[in-house]
Amino acid sequence: MSGATQWPSKGSRQASLLARLDIQRPEDLLLHLPLRYEDETRLTSIEQAQPGANAQIEAEVLSCEITRPRRQLLARLRDEAGSEIVARWINFYPSLQKQLTSGRRVRLFGEVRGGFFGVEMVHPRLRWVDKGDPLPQSLTPVYPTTAGLGQPTLRRLLDATLETSPLDEPLPAAIRQRLELPGFAEAIHTLHRPPSDADEHLLTEREHPAWQRIKFEELLVQQLSLRRAYNARRAHDAVRLPLCRTLTQPLRDRLPFALTSAQRRVMDEISADLTAPHPMQRLLQGDVGSGKTIVAAFAMLQAAENGWQAVLMAPTEILAEQHYRKLAAWLDPLGVDIAWLSGGRKKRERETELARLQSGECLLAVGTHALIETPVALPRLALAVIDEQHRFGVRQRLALRNKGVAGARPHMLMMSATPIPRTLAMTHYADLDISTLDELPPGRTPVHTRLASTARRAEIIARLKAACLEGQQAYWVCPLIEESEALQLKTALETWETLKETLPELQIGLIHGRLKAEEKTATMAAFVAGELHVLVATTVIEVGVDVPRASLMVIEHAERFGLAQLHQLRGRVGRGATQSSCVLLYEPPLSGTARARLKVIFEHHDGFAIAREDLRIRGPGEFIGARQSGLPLLRYADLERDKALIEPAREVAEELLANHPEAVEKLLTRWLGGREGLLRA
Ligand code: ADP
Ligand code: MG
């Protein structure tokens, strides 16, 4: 092996270029697969070359010159049949001119087009040849790369690596046969060095069996690492919290409504988890308004009736306070005390609450991240519920987990109103058990949604006035201004001023993130009490706010919001029995994506359908973005196109974890190296 093809030494320029492509080891290079392939196995005559298509042409240099005033390198070449072509470079090294000496034979590869100088190729790839030199036998791979690292270098390195690496087969033969997948070594060789008879179309479209194998393996590794994280967490001890019914039954008896069958089902799932001696790790997903809070309340009571502590953590002050009020209303009559901790509460109040929790006198608590940030001692914490879990990061979940009793971990219930399509849940949430509320409480009337251009603002305001004078309440949501919070605040204030001026007969309140906690509380309370007709709000109301009497919502600059956000916002109305409506005000002209998004919200009311469309419009990377999963994104498998591989990947993962630990190690090392790292709390 020559020096040029040895694995680059640590700290070398080549090593750092490879590192930019996340290639640290030979294994990484082997899994650095071509973006596409070029066909250099055939020659095309200049006469037959199709404009706009790639072709390889063999020709002799006739002349070569640098033109002025627009500095370009122009070479004229002629092929065997006597037709001429111009090769043109706008950027070039002076040495290139010296190489293009007349009479020299070269193979040009590139896109043929008709130009000012006749048939031409701009910046063709060159290969110097002698007459009769054989053509390559296989398609030429083109790799993703980075500036300074050329295709020939990557190919040379790969040649050497392919020759020296063992390419072990991790999958037991029986599994491979069952799935009808080619072996790893065969797949890797085919993708890097396709044999001459390989189907070019299947290779380029990534549908070749060799690609199937790699994509399957990638999905399998994802399942393995997630399932392993799941099993590792499950191996810890947790406090057993059997259903005693001393508190849960009285709550059931007093509930002002009948639970939906979906609520009963997920409550049973959670209750069974809490009874087990290892920590629950469950995600409760349910559309906006599906009634997750009461499910959380029952779980918390199951802890309390065993004499253990439970907390509910919410991402915003408004939401935490609302949860507190709701839980207190349900629990007070049972004589169950609940603490409320948030950054906005007065220091003395907070200290009192802390002391009650610390002494174990109070078993239940609701709060914001103040629950984890302050030195809250929860000596008997056995259950942590996290509402709107995607709003929290890994670190915060870890912090909560570590508050538990020494030697045991708290049961964790994560709640989310952003339902995840099944395929995505099966891949990205494979380390959690999932419960789904797929039913809304009865009596909800679907929100009537309308789109209106800002030109119709006055008309919308007139309708708002009429509705409010008839006793309805409304939210007016101010535009999202991502670049600047200050600007967003300014807009909110202006909107509030203008609405107050235009509608002097109405009581109009304003709520935004910068208000003091007491101000927020007072404003929300006034709105809940019906003292305000209209609540002008920034997106602070996006999550969880529940005021059943509010039946009208106007969202300004709706085109700036994401789909999940619009769905959440709209979910603030339609909570009572009155027909509710939501007006999406947009500023024309709309971009294509903005139009597509608004259309989805207009046409769909079901959070799952909206999530599916969102996934389609944005792709999984961005969709899942907020999860901070610590898991590398899929490079080759596509959740939509390759969904048929997901279920088998999951099954094989379980099989390998149970019976083939050495295969698991091999796969994880190959794909993730040491990068499996901290796989989430
Ligand atoms: P989300 O799932 O969006 O958090 P909430 O828990 O806030 O939903 O519930 C929405 C509203 O529905 C609340 O006012 C709640 O008290 C009420 N609710 C919950 N379950 C039921 C039910 N089974 N029947 C009627 N109303 C319910
Ligand atoms: Mg909620």
Image: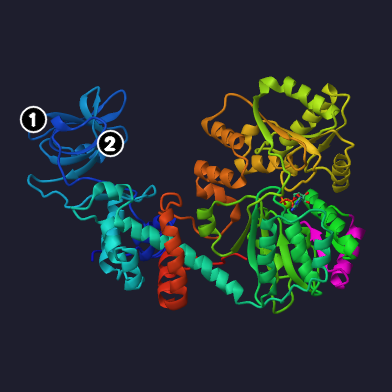
Q: Secondary structure at mark 2?
A: loop
- The residue shown at (80%, 48%) is 318
**Quarter of the image containing the N terminus?**
bottom left
Task: Give the residue at mark 1.
Answer: 82
Q: What residue appears at the point 34 percent right and 64 percent down from the top-left corner?
A: 179
* Front-most of residues 512 and 32: 512
> Residue at point 82% right, 22% down?
502
The x and y percentages for residue 365 are 81, 63
Magenta stretch in the rendered image? 346-368
Image quadrant where residue 232 sits: bottom right
Q: Residue 656's image quarter?
A: bottom left
In front: mark 2 or mark 1? 1
Residue 607 position in % (x across, y down): 62, 46
Does 379 sit above or below residue 72? Answer: below
- Residue 313 lies in the magenta stretch: no
Amino acid under disc 2:
His
Please name the residue that numbered disc 2 is placed on.
Answer: 123
Q: At label 1, which amino acid type do we have?
A: Gly
Q: Residues within 10 Å of mark 1 (few under 14, many from 20)?
A: few
The reply to whether residue 673 is visible in this rendering is: no
Could you tell whether 576 is left or right of 99 in the image? Answer: right
- Which quadrant would the C terminus be assigned to in this image? bottom right
Provide residue 435's location: percent of width, then percent of height.
62, 60
From what the image shows, is residue 57 above or below residue 313?
above
As drawn, is 477 to the left or to the right of 105? right
